[in-house]
Image (spheres, grey):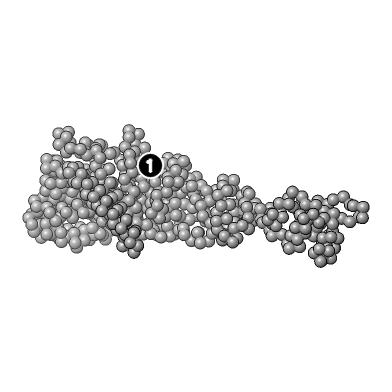
Amino acid sequence: MSLDADAVARRYAARPGCRFLGFRSVGLTVFAMSVRVLALEPRQIPPVDEFLLRLLYEGITSVADLALLLGIDSDLVHNRLVELRRLELIDVMPYSSNDNLHCTLTAKGQQATQTFKQSVMQEVTVPNVIYHGLLRRPFDLGEQARRQYLRPKEAKEQDLTLVPAIPNRYPHAEEIDVKTLDRLVKGSVSKRERSAARDIVAVKSVLKNVSTLYEPAVLLEYETLDGRQERQIAFVVEGELKEDYEAGFAKGRGLEILADLLTPHAEPIEERIKQQVAPKIAQRLGKFDDAEMLASQVATVRQQMDDARQQLAQTDRADTRSQLQDQIRELEAKLAAAEAERNARKVKYLWTPEIRAKLWEALRTAKERLLILSGWISSEVVDERFIDAIDAALKRGVKIWIGYGFDKESRRGQEHRNKGSWREAEDALASLQRSYPDQLVVRDVGRSHEKRLICDNRFTFGGSFNLLSFSGEQRGHGKVRHEGADLIEDPEFCEQLYNRYLRMFFAPKMEPSRK
């Protein structure tokens, strides 16, 4: 059960009054269990009893008359009347002068004649109840429903972030909503059987051997644009935004309880830019406080267009195709307007796939200088295609600096440097450097946290994206992490960054920050 998490994120990135923070593929905890319940079990009244009740309803009350009309032995009639009395469907009338027994219907008996059924309270087991750990209510029912959820091993194989129940335990019997469970039970039977379905009146216990399963979903994170900067968490399941999941997460204090699962607080782009550039440059850059919102709008419209085109390719109905074609034309106009507004800015916020595209644009179009810094390096990115692109730029006369290396003195840093993918990437760059000793400088700078690209004096971007180790592509069953980058197009700022970062390539050793 795979999820295209990146497409989901683009589809729902734009939320009014909020900026999009990130997303991740998750598994929401559900519990599969059997419960013991008290239920009113409907039972069909036997044919003899049904005819006796019908005759009593018509005013025929003596045992002799009942036996005569039914054509059966009076002893059998007497025995059935005793059973009907035990079930409180009839009362016995005082003996008449001829000592013949007479009966009459009780209110319960009169009601039974309308349906010819009776209900018996009994304790039964309801198997395969799926209880949702976030919504805290019975959610699904049956063996087939159980198979739709992932076992822990399957969730791990899909590399899902597991979201525990809130609270992190299966429910007590008294927590299970009886009406919801009763509705699920009745909904699981056929129409024919529904009229005979039992009525659940109480949950007595949750039986042992409760199984923990996971529902695949995409978790979306937002932050309000007002001064409060409140976090909002939404969930998408099978492509549908679930408002009740969001409400359940908020009601259960998920922001507080599951804070470790969420994206750390990040400053808005206007604060990040002001920390990077001098006031006079910031003023020259123009408007950029809505750069993240514009990026989300563009991503959302692009995904809506992809969705509509996919639907168009899958339908043969003329009326549906016409509606989709109209929708696509409207989205194309909307996208063109949003992209024109965004492209007019000197500051842009780049989404994950846009970062990779901008890297390749720099490799193709750099004319004089190109600087790339990345915390990590891997042959997943520094592959044959990447080396060929660097080689082509060098042949155009471009001067290139490539710096990498994070936590050189730490155990984690050494573990990464011992990986085959790290060494393969280093060897490929070292070989290219030997061919261009005056143009290409490659260095493990030791303890750099920087992720930065500068292309000529045209543009620069930086963020959390490791340019030399993270491909930005979707892997496995759909998990992809969201990374962002702030793009700035300003020659003076690019020049300042060259002066700052080129020191890394000539300093004898990178020292740890003393902040």
Quadrant that contains the N terminus: bottom left
> Considering the numbered disc 1 on the image, is that residue within a helix, a strand or a loop?
strand
Which residue is outermost to the front? 58
Q: Which residue is mark 1?
A: 232
Q: Position of residue 220 (x, y in %)?
A: 36, 47
Is residue 484 toward the left or the right of residue 247 in the image? Answer: left
Disc 1 crowd rating (10 Å Cα; few below 14, some 14-19, many 20+) is some
- Considering only vertical position in the picture, is 171 above or below 317? above
- Viewer can see residue 322: yes
Q: What amino acid type is highlighted by mark number 1? A: Gln
Q: Residue at x 52, y 48 (%)?
A: 137
> Residue 406, relative to residue 224: is it above or below?
below
* Residue at horizontal 18 percent and vertical 48 percent from the top: 453
In the rendered view, does 405 fall on the left or right side of 212? left
Which residue corresponds to the image point at 18% horizontal and 42% vertical from the top-left? Answer: 345
| Front-most of residues 495 and 424 | 495
Coordinates of residue 503 in the picture (x, y in percent): 14, 44
Q: Is residue 223 above or below residue 186?
A: above
The image quarter in which residue 321 lies: bottom left
- Quadrant of the snapshot with the C terminus: top left
Q: Position of residue 262 (x, y in %)?
A: 37, 45
Residue 311: image location, x then y, percent:
33, 59
Q: Residue at x 81, y 56 (%)?
A: 60
Q: Nearer the viewer, residue 403 or 141?
A: 141
